[in-house]
Amino acid sequence: TDVAAGSYCYDAVQWAVANGITKGTDTTHFSPNAGCTRGQVVTFLWRAAGRPAPSGSVQQFSDVPKTNSYAYCYDAILWAVENGITKGTDATHFSPNATVTRAQFVTFLWRYAGEPAPKNMSCGFNDVDANAFYYKAVLWAVENGVTTGKTATQFAPGATCTRCEVAAFMFRAFSKGI
């Protein structure tokens, strides 16, 4: 009930729920403006990829124990690391409960897509530095219609990526066949 028909993320949320990528936060709410965690977005990508089994079974991150609290994202994180989608926040931590930024999530999508080289190396966002780890990911995302930014000149790389944004970015990327 909290995602209006016609909103920018309505079709994306419908797609994500229908395909088992995510559920609502309860039976009638999606909470579109709530932030997503790193554990959640990696799990969404893993589910969209068909829930592939990771080749390993032992987590390298001390903050992702194999317990009920992390059961939903345990295999997803193993898979994401094995496939170069993320390395964690350092060698021994994934930070599954930390909110994911727009820069981080676009980078996860770009890495999932195989790190394709952007055709245009010029960025129209004045808040995206050419030396940033996410520079090519943002260029790729804009080039492929995954995002247009928060405004015409601002990507807001450090802003929390909301549930609605995550669904929209994924829907657009997967619709393009990444």
Image (tube, helix red, strand yellow):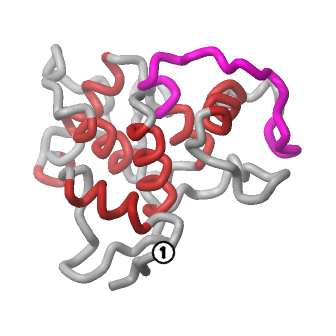
Quarter of the picture holding the C terminus = top left
How would you rate the neighbour count of disc 1 (Cα within 10 Å): few for under 14, some for 14-19, many for 20 or more? few
Looking at the rendered structure, the secondary structure element under dot 1 is: loop
Residue appearing at x 16%, y 14% in the figure = 55
- State the residue at coordinates (51%, 42%): 105
| Quadrant housing residue 64 | top left
Left or right placement of residue 67 versus residue 129 in this view: left
Was residue 127 drawn as part of the magenta stretch in this picture?
yes
- Is the residue 121 above or below the residue 45 in the image? above
Name the kind of residue labelled 1 in the image. Answer: Gly
**Residue 20 in the image, given as x and y percentages of width and height:** 18, 52
The percent coordinates of residue 94 (x first, y second) are: 40, 36
In the displayed structure, 134 sits above or below 19; it is above
The residue under label 1 is 6
- In this view, the residue farthest toward the right is 126
| Picture layout, residue 69 above or below residue 174 | below
Q: Is residue 31 left or right of residue 123?
A: left
Q: Bounds of the magenta span?
A: 109-128
Q: Quadrant of the N terminus?
A: bottom left
Left or right, residue 142 beside residue 82: right
